[in-house]
Image (cartoon, helix red, strand yellow):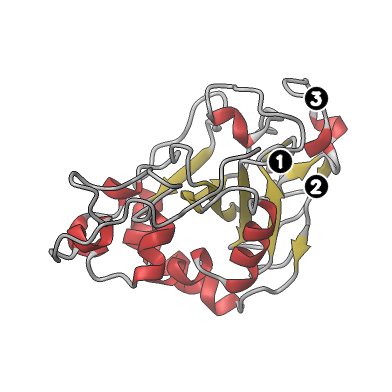
Amino acid sequence: MVIDDLVAPETMDALESELAPFLASTPYGDDFSGHHTRRTGGLVSRSPASRDLVMHPIVTGAVGSVLGHATTFQLHLTQVISIEPGQDAQYVHRDQWAFDFFSFPNGYEVTCNTIWAMTDFTAENGGTRVIPGSHRYDDKLRFTEADTEATEMRKGSALIYTGALYHGGGPNRSDGPRNGVNITYCVGWLRQEENQYLSVPPQIARELPDDLLRMIGYAPGAYALGYVDDLRDPIAVLRGGGPQSSFGSNVITPPA
């Protein structure tokens, strides 16, 4: 699903300005991530403007709907993906293969993802290519670029899709880079792809609002996941507070 003009183009300009030095120093990728593609992470720490995208209410509402079968969801990764001219189409894949290629039950979503257009996305410049409806397909299928459709959207728009959707970056046959902001979310009981606790150093994390900290992962992922030592709340520990307990703060009823 594409949501047009979800933020003003000026918001993307702010991200681009904040992240420009990091993007310029990021090395190119490999056969999968792209030999003419840069992937720059650590956005919450490096770009204050990115925090509004992470916590955008329309996006988090959609994510909550898709991942509502879990007790909580959390930030999975943040990344600018810059596909430069000459890059071939990416291998068509599912993002949920990051979990060691485990085949989750068909229809059981474990991630919900966004790609925000930092620049306009077109078929020519590498707009993300998708196979509509493929989140219901069998796992570990093989597809080619010819099986996909290009996502075309204006700067400031966002593509929202599940981790089960077969997709890939498109080939860039234009004369400029295609920049997108990939922000993804996963259920609270899975390991995050990007280590948020090191990507966002404690001295920066302590200055962030509690709701963003919880999204990063400073919160129980279920009944007994994510506490610190003697069942202490991770936000209280981060801020140097007292022995507040977090154990059991997400009480669930076992299935019958």
Secondary structure of residue under mark 2? strand
Q: Earlier in the sequence, mark 2 or mark 3?
A: 3
Between 181 and 171, the residue placed more toward the observer is: 181
In the rendering, which numbered label is found on residue 225?
none
Tell me which amino acid carries mark 1.
Answer: Gly
List the residue tagged with mark 1.
170
List the residue tagged with mark 2.
150
- Compared with 170, 127 (above or below) is below
Cα–Cα span, label 1 and label 3: 23 Å
Q: Residue furthest front?
A: 256
Where is residue 52? Give x, y as percent. 48, 72
Residue 87 at least partly seen: no
Q: Are marks 1 and 3 in contact (CB under 8 Å)?
A: no
Could you classify mark 3 by the number of other residues whose Cα lies within 10 Å: few (under 14), some (14-19), or many (20 or more)? few
Could you classify mark 2 by the number of other residues whose Cα lies within 10 Å: few (under 14), some (14-19), or many (20 or more)? many
Secondary structure of residue under mark 1? loop
- Dividing the picture into quadrants, the one containing residue 212 is bottom left
Q: Earlier in the sequence, mark 2 or mark 1?
A: 2
Residue 28 at least partly seen: yes
- Dividing the picture into quadrants, the one containing residue 160 is bottom right
Q: Are marks 2 and 1 in contact (CB under 8 Å)?
A: yes
Instruction: Tell me which residue sits at (61%, 34%) in the image.
Output: 96
Tell me which amino acid carries mark 2.
Answer: Ala
Between 44 and 185, the residue placed more toward the observer is: 185
Q: Earlier in the sequence, mark 1 or mark 3?
A: 3
Quarter of the image containing the N terminus?
bottom right
Tag in front: 1 or 3: 3
Secondary structure of residue under mark 3? loop
Cα–Cα span, label 2 and label 1: 7 Å
Tell me which amino acid carries mark 3.
Answer: Asp
List the residue tagged with mark 3.
138
